[in-house]
Image: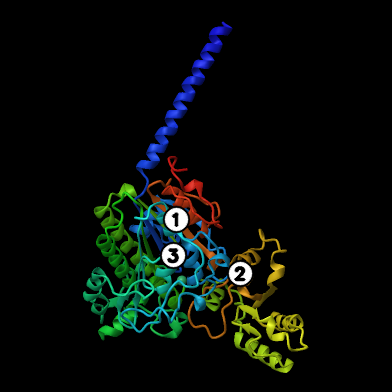
């Protein structure tokens, strides 16, 4: 009996061992079979995750398909303090926070006079401030045949997701109403982009009206809200100029901009022959209409509701067309946003029956700083304040008897007493805070590199806007601005709604795992294993 039992056990183990080995082998070959030939990375500028839930029933197109049939993380964050477009896009495919990408603000984003545009008077642009690598660099280090096309309404939306990579990168120049690029990338425009521009689609919208996609009863939001759009043209229909060049410059504030961008992306995919394998290619698309519409009318507007529905339909058409051109089982999608947005404070307070936070006035503080420096006899550039960051040039104090720390402390005290300001933090004290509970401290730490020269950071009260702001705002370290959706869909992805906290910096390492490559630098993000199908986990 014991002998036969041990024989049985051995045989069972052998069988188990064998079957385990075989299962692993099958998993490996399965993961190889689904290894995508195309990554489609979608960034929707200023998309809040609550939009996808609020209007879920009406999302019958691409947004619905991705968020309801993909792996959807509704609790994802751009976990840094200055929630603007440039730092947000720089984090999407780098897997790193702004402290490491070097892209801190829009005002020090991609503008580069040494990289003029090929066919437009719009400002020159390049990624020269960007540090480190991104997904396309890791892809190319495994297979140099991998290529990328990145396209957007905005220069920073097209450039920063690819880091410094000199791939096919195009954006829309309003001064010419055409897609173009800068000298950093090319000396001439490719034929396919010329073909797109020659159709003069933006100009053809002259005199067109943006009207509601669905019957009016489908929109619970009031239309006539005078706080929107600085009190001008805040009701439907929104009519474009009858003059073609002006219509082309107005197009970005309408849902048609995203359709134009998606159509151009498909044309580029075909012209460049992306996604046919054997290597994996990358198609990065940043869709900006949500940001323009959101700034004008705010996140609670009928305009944003309708714009998101238009975007949903345009994305649906895009995905359907893409699946006709390429094998759908070889494509993996990711969708996220560069930041969210905060409601108009007075409007939000009025609707909630409470008092709005006071608006904060930066110019008074700037004048106060100037007179403090003047009074101390120190160079006016010794301490700079841009409304958020206090930057210090300590060498400017060397020839004076003034203690910079005392002057800074005085200025910080002055700022703390300003209405609408929540906190003024000394940067070197931030790491001692509870960065798990205190999201503002953590997001500031993720923002600043040690060589940025920033010594103090100023945080407004939650929900507060700057004085005089007529448009809806983002850029704060609070959740309304930091929270974004993160979605994966397609090859290698396990669908489901995953409520665990995720970060936008997790997107790049997760996609890297799906396509079987290894990032070659240290990342802030981690692989979101719960989004992955068994074969690639
Ligand atoms: Zn943005």
Task: Give coordinates of residue 93: x percent, y percent.
Answer: 46, 60
Numbered tag placed on residue 102 in the rendering: none
Circle on res. 161: 3
- The residue that appears at 44% across and 85% down in the rendered structure is 231
The residue depicted at 63 percent of the width and 87 percent of the height is: 381
Taking the view exactly as shown, the residue that stands out farthest to the top is 1
Task: Tell us which disc is closer to us: 1 or 3.
Answer: 1
Give the residue pinned by disc 1: 138
In what element is the residue under mark 1?
helix
Residue 187 is situated, as x and y percent measured from the top left of the image, at 31, 75
Q: Neighbour class for label 2 at 10 Å: few (<14), some, many (≥20)?
A: many
The mark nearer the N terminus, 2 or 3, is 3
* Mark 1 or 2, nearer chain start: 1
- Under circle 2, the secondary element is loop
Taking the spot 29% from the left edge, 77% from the top edge, the residue there is 178
Callout 3 crowding tier (Cα within 10 Å): few <14, some 14–19, many ≥20:
many
| Residue tagged 2 | 448
């Amino acid at each position: 009996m014991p002998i036969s039992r041990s024989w049985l056990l051995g045989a069972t183990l052998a069988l188990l061992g064998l079957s385990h080995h075989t299962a692993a082998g099958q998993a490996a070959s399965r993961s190889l079979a689904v290894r995508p030939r195309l990554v489609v990375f979608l960034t929707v500028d200023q998309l809040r995750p609550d939009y996808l839930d609020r209007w879920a029933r009406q999302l019958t197109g691409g947004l619905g398909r991705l968020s309801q049939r993909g792996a959807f993380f509704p609790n994802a964050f751009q976990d840094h303090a200055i929630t603007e477009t440039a730092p947000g896009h720089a984090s999407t495919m780098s897997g790193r926070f702004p402290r490491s990408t070097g892209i801190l603000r829009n005002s020090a984003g991609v503008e580069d006079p040494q990289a003029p545009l090929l066919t437009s008077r719009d400002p020159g642009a390049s990624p020269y401030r960007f540090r480190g690598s991104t997904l396309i660099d890791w892809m190319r280090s495994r297979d140099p045949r991998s290529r990328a096309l990145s396209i957007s309404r905005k220069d920073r939306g097209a450039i920063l997701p690819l880091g410094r990579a000199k791939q096919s990168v195009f954006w829309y120049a309003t001064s010419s109403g055409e897609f173009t690029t800068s000298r950093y990338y090319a000396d001439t425009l490719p034929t396919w982009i010329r073909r797109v521009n020659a159709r003069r689609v933006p100009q053809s919208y002259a005199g067109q009206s943006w009207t509601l996609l669905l019957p009016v009863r489908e929109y619970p939001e009031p239309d006539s809200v005078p706080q929107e759009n600085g009190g001008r043209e805040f009701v439907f229909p929104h009519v474009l100029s009858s003059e073609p060049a002006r219509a082309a410059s107005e197009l970005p504030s309408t849902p048609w901009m995203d359709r134009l961008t998606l159509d151009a992306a498909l044309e580029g995919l075909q012209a460049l022959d992306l996604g046919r394998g054997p290597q994996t290619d990358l198609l990065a698309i940043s869709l900006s209409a949500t940001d323009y519409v959101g700034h004008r009318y705010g996140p609670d507007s009928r305009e944003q509701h309708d714009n998101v529905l238009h975007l949903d339909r345009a994305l649906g058409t895009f995905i359907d067309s893409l699946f006709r051109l390429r094998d759908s089982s070889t494509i993996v999608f990711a969708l996220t946003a560069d930041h969210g947005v905060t409601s108009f404070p007075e409007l939000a307070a009025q609707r909630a029956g409470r008092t709005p936070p006071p608006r904060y006035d930066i110019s008074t503080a700037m004048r106060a700083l100037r007179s403090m420096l003047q009074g101390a006899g120190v160079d006016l550039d010794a301490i700079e304040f841009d409304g958020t960051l206090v930057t210090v040039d300590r060498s400017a104090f060397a020839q004076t008897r003034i203690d910079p720390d005392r002057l800074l402390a005085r200025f910080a005290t002055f700022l703390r007493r300003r209405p609408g300001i929540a906190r003024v933090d000394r940067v070197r004290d931030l790491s001692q805070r509870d960065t798990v509970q205190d999201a503002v401290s953590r997001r500031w730490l993720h923002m600043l590199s040690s060589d940025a020269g920033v010594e103090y950071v100023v945080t407004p009260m939650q929900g507060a806007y700057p004085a005089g702001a007529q448009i809806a705002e983002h850029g704060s370290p609070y959740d309304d601005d930091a929270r974004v959706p993160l979605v994966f869909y397609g090859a290698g992805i396990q669908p489901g709604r995953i409520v665990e906290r995720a970060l936008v910096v997790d997107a790049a390492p997760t996609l890297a795992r799906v396509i079987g490559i290894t990032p070659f630098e240290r990342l802030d993000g981690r692989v979101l294993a719960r989004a992955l199908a068994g074969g690639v986990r």
